[in-house]
């Protein structure tokens, strides 16, 4: 079987995949209300929130859009903290909807500096929202959302703190309420061990107050409709029913392992990945203290073509790694380790990487 | 097994459900490009278009939103032809994005009058787009999209003709290019025999010219990004991979049956449904000449509570019909017959309906 080691979609366990083949039911009937209610209740644990978590039928990008259009108005001043492609995407979405976006960028491989975020907020007291990516899969770096949040609140207690937790939630510790995050989003195909197609969003009371004033247009992604329909045990629009079946099972499994244990396993596997990559004589892109526990970016060594490397890994070794994106295209390859993953998956991936490099004539420099 | 007879999600055949449990692959890799290319090419037959058909990960409502935000600007004058709840929804979406919407409403149970649509267009020559629902599931009525299209073009050759073909395409004859439709949308859980989660959209050259001028904000649903990424065999955002597997198989099956044969089967099953409902002494909501071939609306007889009827059908007879919506709530129940359906499914549903009515003390009036 293929060793799919990209930062999502992640391989799914047979337990959740098996559920996907169940027959359809009426999404406006009592059976669906049971499933939706059970899922919404249990998602709260993973968001570590007391507020409701809504389920959207879309990708993570749709959820990012939802977090913006439900809380902001055209012309609102927004601080977009970017440490890579997904930070850029958050800024692009806000711009597409007419926000006045100021970008605060950090070098690829580094995390956002909380003091710099606070300083930027102090420079522009009219800022309505700060957009932050918790875990940047394009570089393999995790932002310190808690520390940034503290700095944000110290600089501007009323600002909306909007976090993309797509590739972290369920894998890397995240605490919506304790960290005073106003909008948090994630999706199905990363930590939740089911295929893509569902995304999740939660809004704080502060975010709901912003919702009442927000004038960006919205319909499919209107959080208020999700809130109103949730009272009836329904989603506003026809949902991706099969994925609800899978998610229900995935949540059983995640409860069984326990959130802290899941987080610890991800940390262990990530450390193991970094150790094995370095042992091949390869360089990691991310600063060690910010290295992600869900994806590792490996610098492609001089003389090796990244596209060729990924091709040989796939065709000859059944291993699928991800390419670099944007500025990092051709410069790095990325190893995903989120969801159902253990050290053996990493052993197989790194052995394949080593063999593929050999095949391409790369010689590890002498120690 | 439950007899799920609602206007979507429809029951899925084991062949497509079985595909949903396949393992994930890289949506940016060559295997996915193969699947996406094959599906996009074959979807053209069902839309009867030479233009590309794009696959969105969302419900049909998302596709309706896509058809508006990709072609229009705030302030644009739009004529929304409404024969029921989904016509209303189309108008609501356009209004949410700032269009100036004029509604042309027809009585529930009747279809839109092409001459009235043309007259409305002539009254307002600045109209940029006409929104039409091909098949209105809330009433069980099918609009004559071809005749409306002819009237529309005669009144205003440049107007955008935007059609929601969600509950018709693949079941009821539809011809995007021959009928000069500019934007057509549908989704996965109706005629395509797979669960909800995917929607499809195609744009004419006239619609693409409108796209270049359109100023409504869009990101997740930006058709231009779907077009650009399609050249690489990719979707812009992570797609609902499992549903692509199912769709690939469904298209095999639909090609095998043949589009004309599929349409004929839907017509036969619908006629059979209407005959059997009338034989119970019950009234149909839709005018016979516009009665839908994918959903039949049955008027709930005096003295019977619609909610109770649906409850007994589900709990005692394993049959799930749909409730009335909006103004028709409590007044009708709806029988879906789209996708994989034959006369035996209808026999089972009508036998259950008859027995449930008996149980509720309803006595058929003497002939």
Image (cartoon, coloured by chain):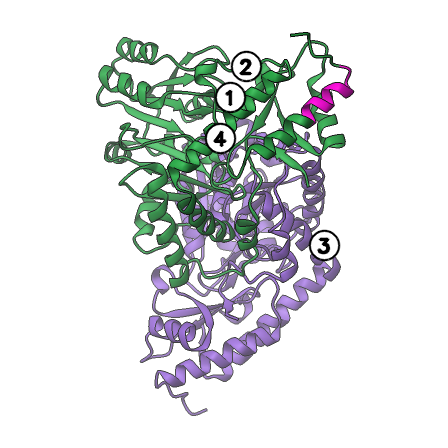
Chain colours: A purple, B green
SS at circle 4: loop
Let me know if marks 2 and 1 both belong to one chain.
yes
Determine whether the residue tagged by mark 2 lies in a helix, strand or loop: loop
In the picture, measured across the screen, residue B156 lies left or right of residue B251, that is left
Q: Which residue is mark 3?
A: A252
Instruction: Tell me, for residue A219, which label it has, or none.
Output: 4
Q: Label 1, secondary structure: give it.
A: loop
Mark 3, chain letter? A
Query: CB atoms at circles 2 and 1 under 8 Å apart?
Result: yes
**For the residues marked 4 and 1, what is the alpha-carbon distance in whole angstroms?**
25 Å
Of marks 4 and 3, the one in the foreground: 3
The Cα atoms of the two marked residues, 4 and 2, are separated by 30 Å
Q: Which residue is mark 1?
A: B140
Residue hosting label 2: B285
Q: Of B3 and B34, which appears nearest the observer?
A: B3
> How far apart are labels 3 and 2 at the CA level?
45 Å
Residue B317 location, x and y as percent? 73, 31
Q: Dominant secondary structure of the magenta stretch? A: helix
Residue extending furthest front?
A: B367
The span shown in magenta is B352-361
Q: Quadrant of the N terminus of chain B?
A: top right
């Amino acid at each position: 079987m293929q060793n799919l080691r990209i930062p999502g979609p992640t391989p799914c366990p047979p337990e959740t995949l098996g559920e996907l083949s169940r027959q359809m039911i009426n999404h406006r009937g009592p059976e669906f209300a049971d499933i939706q209610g059970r899922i919404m209740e249990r998602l709260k644990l993973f968001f570590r929130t007391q507020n409701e978590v809504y389920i959207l039928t879309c990708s993570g990008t749709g959820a990012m859009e939802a977090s913006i259009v439900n809380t902001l108005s055209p012309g609102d001043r927004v601080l977009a903290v970017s440490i890579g492609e997904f930070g850029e995407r958050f800024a692009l979405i806000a711009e597409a909807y007419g926000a006045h976006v100021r970008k605060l960028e950090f070098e690829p491989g580094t995390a956002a500096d909380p003091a710099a975020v606070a300083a930027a907020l102090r420079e522009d007291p009219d800022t309505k929202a700060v957009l932050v990516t918790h875990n940047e899969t394009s570089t393999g770096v995790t932002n310190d959302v808690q520390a940034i949040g503290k700095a944000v609140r110290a600089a501007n207690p009323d600002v909306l703190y909007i976090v993309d937790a797509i590739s972290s939630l369920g894998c890397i510790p995240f605490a919506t309420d304790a960290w005073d995050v106003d909008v948090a989003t994630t999706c199905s195909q990363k930590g939740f061990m089911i295929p893509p197609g569902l995304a999740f969003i939660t809004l704080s009371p502060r975010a709901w107050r912003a919702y009442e004033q927000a004038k960006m247009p919205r319909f499919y992604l209107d959080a208020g409709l999700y809130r109103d329909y949730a009272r009836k045990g329904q989603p506003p629009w026809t949902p991706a029913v099969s994925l609800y079946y899978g998610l229900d099972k995935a949540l059983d499994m995640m409860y069984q392992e326990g959130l802290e244990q899941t987080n610890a396993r991800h940390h262990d596997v990530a450390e193991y990945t970094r150790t094995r990559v370095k042992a091949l004589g390869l360089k990691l892109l991310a600063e060690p203290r910010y290295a992600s526990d869900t994806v590792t970016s490996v610098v492609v060594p001089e003389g090796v073509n990244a596209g060729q490397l990924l091709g040989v890994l796939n065709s000859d070794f059944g291993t699928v790694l991800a390419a670099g994106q944007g500025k990092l295209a051709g410069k790095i390859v990325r190893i995903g380790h989120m969801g159902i993953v253990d050290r053996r998956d990493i052993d197989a991936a790194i052995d394949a990487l080593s063999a593929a490099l050999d095949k391409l004539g790369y010689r590890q420099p002498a120690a």
